[in-house]
Amino acid sequence: MLSRTSICFSLILQFTLSATCSSCQYLLLVHHVQQVPF
């Protein structure tokens, strides 16, 4: 029971970090694109 819970928590944490990283990269990309003068 404990191991299953810790694995579940680990997967959720990993997914959250992955989503956060993707969001940060997207925001940085948008910010970088807006900084470029056309």
Image: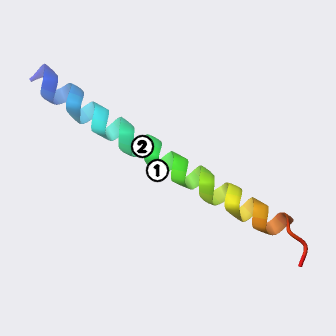
Question: Which numbered disc covers residue 19?
Answer: 1
Q: Residue at x 56, y 54 (%)?
A: 23
Quarter of the picture containing the C terminus is: bottom right
Q: Residue furthest bottom?
A: 38
Q: Residue furthest right?
A: 37
Colouring scheme applied when the structure was drawn:
rainbow
Quadrant location of residue 10? top left
Task: Give above or below for 26 relative to 10.
Answer: below
Quarter of the picture containing the N terminus is: top left
How far apart, in angstroms, are the residues tagged by discs 2 and 1?
5 Å
Q: Residue at x 18, y 28 (%)?
A: 5
- In this image, 20 relative to 6: left or right? right
- In this image, 9 relative to 27: left or right? left
Task: Say which amino acid is labelled 1.
Answer: Ala
- In this image, 38 relative to 21: left or right? right
Quadrant location of residue 15? top left
Q: Residue at x 15, y 23 (%)?
A: 3
Q: Residues within 10 Å of mark 2 (few under 14, many from 20)?
A: few
Question: Would you name the residue on which mark 2 appears?
Answer: 16
Comparing 37 with 1, the one in front is 37
Whether the residues at callouts 2 and 1 have beta carbons within 8 Å, the answer is: yes
Task: Give above or below for 34 relative to 21.
Answer: below
- In this image, 37 relative to 25: left or right? right
Q: Residues within 10 Å of mark 1 (few under 14, many from 20)?
A: few
Task: Say which amino acid is labelled 2.
Answer: Thr
Locate residue 37, reporting x and y percent: 90, 73
Locate residue 22, reporting x and y percent: 53, 53
Label 2 sits on a secondary structure element that is: helix
